[in-house]
Image: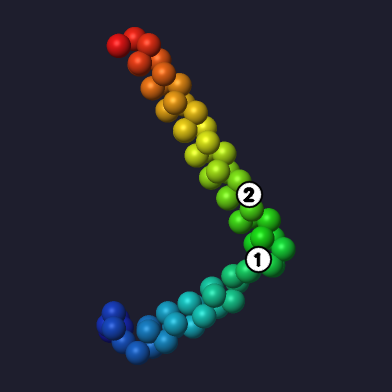
Amino acid sequence: MAEKKDSPALKRSWFQELKHEFGKITWPTKIVLAKETGVVLVTAVLLGALIVVVDWLLNLALQFIW
């Protein structure tokens, strides 16, 4: 007879596998984390500036047309 889905053995096996998978996680060092955070912030600022410039240019063009 097959085991039921909610049997304690299956739950224990699932939690053991979950614990094993968590053991595979590698966390970044503080230096790597700081560098990656810096890249994200610089990218966000540059993208925001690009959007502002494009918005300003489109606004200027539309004012010229209207």
**Left or right of 47, for residue 7:** left
Residue 13 picture quarter: bottom left
Residue tagged 2: 39
Nearest to the observer: residue 62 or residue 27: 62
Mark 2 closeness class: few <14, some 14–19, many ≥20 residues within 10 Å:
few
Which quarter of the rendered picture does the N terminus lie within?
A: bottom left
What numbered label is drawn on residue 59?
none
Residue beneath the point at 54% across and 75% down: 22
x and y, in percent, of residue 27 in the image: 63, 69
Residue beneath the point at 35% across and 90% down: 8
Point out the residue furthest to the right here.
31
x and y, in percent, of residue 5 in the image: 29, 79
Name the element at disc 2: helix
Residue 49 to residue 44: above or below = above
Mark 1 closeness class: few <14, some 14–19, many ≥20 residues within 10 Å:
few
Of marks 2 and 1, which one's residue comes earlier in the chain? 1
Residue 9 picture quarter: bottom left
Residue tagged 1: 28
Residue 52 to residue 59: above or below = below
x and y, in percent, of residue 35 in the image: 68, 56
Which quarter of the rendered picture does the C terminus lie within?
A: top left
**Mark 1 residue type:** Pro
Point out the residue furthest to the top here.
65
**Left or right of 31, for residue 44:** left
Of circles 2 and 1, the one toward us is 2
Residue beneath the point at 44% across and 26% down: 56
Nearest to the observer: residue 17 or residue 49: 49
